[in-house]
Amino acid sequence: MILYGERNPAPNPRRVRIFVAEKGIDLPETRVKMRDREHKSPEHRARNSLGQLPTLVLDDGTAISESVSICRYLESLHPDPPMFGRNAVEAARIDMWIRRIEFQLMTPVGMFWRHAHPLTAALLTQFTDFGESNRELYARACGWLDRELAEGGPFIAGGDYTMADIVAQTTVDFAAFTGLALPEDATALRAWHERVSARPSAEAND
């Protein structure tokens, strides 16, 4: 197997690297340089027709894209420690939180990145006012997540670090790279971020 990915701050390839580090999996990664538009090359589009990262290519040539899908596949091969839950209820809750994080946090971060950040200005027509409006949406989502964490366990889906935390962790870190900081008064969210950032897997890069 080969993982085609990119270095930080690209959030989706980082999800897989953190997951692999938590599992202790030896998975070779080939860098696809996004700033050089290598992910849009015919060679990479043959692996992923959308020209996105990451993509996992199996030994038989099968290509799996989408970071959570890649991690689900790896979980089936390496079930311990469980990152998608130990039973049906845990699995459903983790899946619920993954979708919530992607819609509530990652969507405004992505729109801010696309429409308000100078690094993407040359890649598309930006609607700057729309991009900037996502600052408030992200702050509001952080407030919601802060309240949820204050009432729940130490991690997103409860007492264990799971794929939901990885999705949130990479989103928050990428948001910071784009210029979207965590609200100062989001104390529970900030404490969670300190916990996940202290894990050795947070340093996984290449």
Image: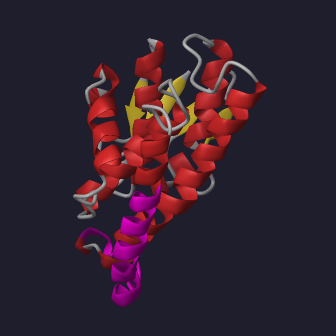
Residue at horizontal 59 percent and vertical 17 percent from the top: 82
Q: Residue furthest right?
A: 88
Any part of residue 69 in sight:
yes
Q: In which quarter of the image is residue 58?
A: top right
Q: In this view, does 176 lie above or below 6?
A: below
Q: Main secondary structure of the magenta part?
A: helix
Q: Which residue lies furthest to the front in this view?
A: 151
Q: How is the image coloured?
A: secondary structure
Quadrant in which the N terminus appears: top right
Rendered location of residue 2, percent (x, y): 51, 25
Compared to residue 81, the image places residue 152 above or below, namely below
Left or right, residue 138 beside residue 206? right
- Image coordinates for residue 68, horizontal then vertical, percent: 59, 39
Q: Position of residue 157 (x, y in %)?
A: 55, 35
Could you tell whether 190 is left or right of 123 in the image?
left
As drawn, is 27 to the left or to the right of 190? right
Q: Where is residue 189 in the image (x, y as percent from the top left)?
A: 35, 47
Q: Quadrant of the C terminus?
A: top left
Camera-side residue of 127 and 91: 91
- The quadrant holding residue 176 is bottom left
Q: Does the magenta stretch include residue 13?
A: no
Q: Which of 98 and 7 is in front in this view?
A: 98
Residue 44 vs residue 192, the one in the foreground: 192
Range of the magenta residues? 119-144
Q: Residue placed at 28% from the left, 48% from the top?
A: 187
Quadrant of res 114:
bottom left
Residue 123 seen: no
Relative to 205, does residue 145 appear above or below in the rendering? below
